[in-house]
Image: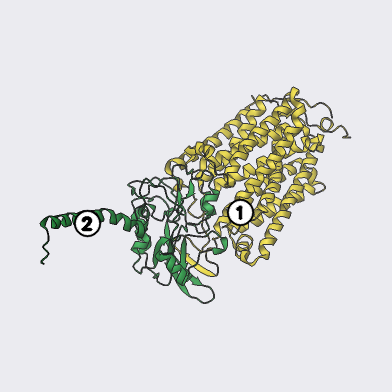
Chain colours: A green, B yellow
Amino acid sequence: MDKKTNPTDQARRRFFGQVAAVASLTVAPGIILQQVAHARAPELPASDRQRWGILINTNKCAEGCDACVTACQDEFGWGPDSPNEKHSAPNQKAQWIRKVKLTDKQTGHVQTLPLMCQHCEHPPCVDVCPTGASMKRADGIVLVDKHICIGCRYCMMACPYKARSFVHEELHDQKVNAPRGKGTVEACTLCVQRVDAGRQPACVEACPEQAMIFGDLKDPESAISRELRERGGEQIRADLGLNTGIRYQGL
Amino acid sequence: MKNIRYSTIKGNSAGYLALLALLGAIAGAGLVAAFMMEHYGHFITGMNQQIVWGTPHVFAVFLIVAASGALNTASIASVFGKTAYKPLARLSGLLAIALLAGGLTILVLDLGRADRLIVAMTYYNFKSIFAWNIILYNGFFLLVAIYLWTMMDPTKTQYTKVAGFSAFVWRLILTTGTGSIFGFLVARLAYNEAIMAPLFIVMSFAFGLAILILVTMAACKWTGRPLGDALLRRLKNLLGVFVAGTLLLLLAYHLTKLYITQYHGVEAFILLNGGVYTQLFWIGWMLLGSLVPLAILYHPSWGRNRSLIGFASVLVVLGGLAAMYVIIIGGQAYPLLIFPGKEVASSFSDGIINSYTPSLVEFVLGIGGMAVALIIVALALKVLQFLPESLADEVVDPHHK
């Protein structure tokens, strides 16, 4: 016997199909983002379930390339192309990230790498700050609260990486990403505004050699964790026991 | 000991007014300098991203260290019962407060956001030795004020000993805190030593006493009050002990650093090839600030010459400023060890000796703070009875022949 499909059933199937598609389209991006980049809703606080970090492969880091540095400058409005800090002497201008060239004293081996705030688990800058302006977020990002920084510069004395800068003059036309302030201290924020939106830090995104991997050090399945597990990675001045969030390969 | 009579100074002579006018002009210039730094920003100073603490900190830390040392003379009288020092106890307490006020004035006015002082007073990170210092400074003002009160109010003298003891213990903790600001800095090769705390304490004894000797000599001379040789001899001998004590701890500091290979670079920088820092260390701090004063103070005939004792005290003060310059700025000038075993180069002064040229505004702010301290002393002597009418030997020491 021929089994004919009831036209009413077909309409019902189409309806359910459409509902399922709309529902998937609505919910899926959220689920995917949560899984992939751990974006967090603005009303939720940073959580210690994550620890953000960057793994930098110095073997891929090209001498003469400063794409990460210029990306950071564009993102936050510092550096020679910014309209600011024109009165400050070269050694008074802020530098949130810098390219460092290393030459081994024994072998003459040369390598370059980007150096910025290492987002320590035990940051000396946070320890010494008298007011608590220097602080570490639950997810490991080390920041300066510009509202309670009194500009004493003790954190700059304490940082083993010289990662922090002091603003020596009035600033204008600032980027909205991270307002800076005369008389306060600042440093790499790990692009906290991007991270909170599920994006990568500007330097990582800009690296033409893909030498930098950003991710969650606490997630064993994240790319950074897998790479660290398989190929290892070192901390700068690991002897200080600060457990940095920025790791390097090929040091 | 006879009853010591204290009285205010008249403070209406042309000399007194001229002194106040001079100090007021220096302090006023210091305020202008601070306002300029606040208004334009720190780019008008010589301080930069590498030398973050400059000349203002040299003066500020010197005054704060000297402040706790200035209290020593009072402590010797009240805590250790040496009555010969008692006539100077009030002046000693006054100087302690005045020098600390002068030093803190500089420190606060140099802040990037001096307008946020209230934040420093209301937000505390108790793991920060800096935050502890803020509490220690305020406590020091309070305890020394109470101590002075027990000395100056005849109905409260039974509390002098306990107040003096409290202030003495507090001042030791305070200078431990000041030294530890540097001692706790893990990243800087020149600091990061527990000995910074006792070194600062023994330096404070020397600097504070040198200033006390100078202020006592000046106050007695300008007000025509007698100052006996016996008291001055005690003070100058004590000053010599403190200067020698500083040398001993400094020797231990440098021997430790010299023994450990990792520190050979920074030691060579400070002691041998650091340019202005090496010169300030050897000529400023060691020769003029320590050895020449020691030779004067313990020389059989020079040590009896008042002018030379005063000169030696001036040298100890100048040597102290040189010491602070070497410790604070020299310590920052030497590069951090970020990559052991590597030569380092970057756009951010990595791997090179950091340059610093002190600016006029910083220097003026520094001497402005010193002037503030001396203005407090000059005014206090006029309104309250800090200064004995006589420090003659027969008044101070009954056994004096």
Q: Is residue B389 visible?
A: no
| Residue B133 position (above or below residue B326) | above
| Residue A41 position (above or below residue A56) | above
Q: Which residue is the site of mark 2? A: A21
Going by the numbered disc 1, the residue's amino acid type is: Val
Q: Residues within 10 Å of mark 1 (few under 14, many from 20)?
A: many
Q: How many marks?
A: 2
Q: Position of residue A225 (x, y in %)?
A: 44, 65
| Residue A161 position (above or below residue A62) | above
User: Do pointers 2 and 1 mark residues of a single chain?
Assistant: no
Q: Residue at x 69, y 47 (%)?
A: B201
Q: Is residue B300 left or right of residue A249?
A: right
Q: Residues within 10 Å of mark 2 (few under 14, many from 20)?
A: few
Mark 2: secondary structure: helix
Q: Which mark is residue B326?
A: 1
Q: Is residue B232 left or right of residue B286?
A: right
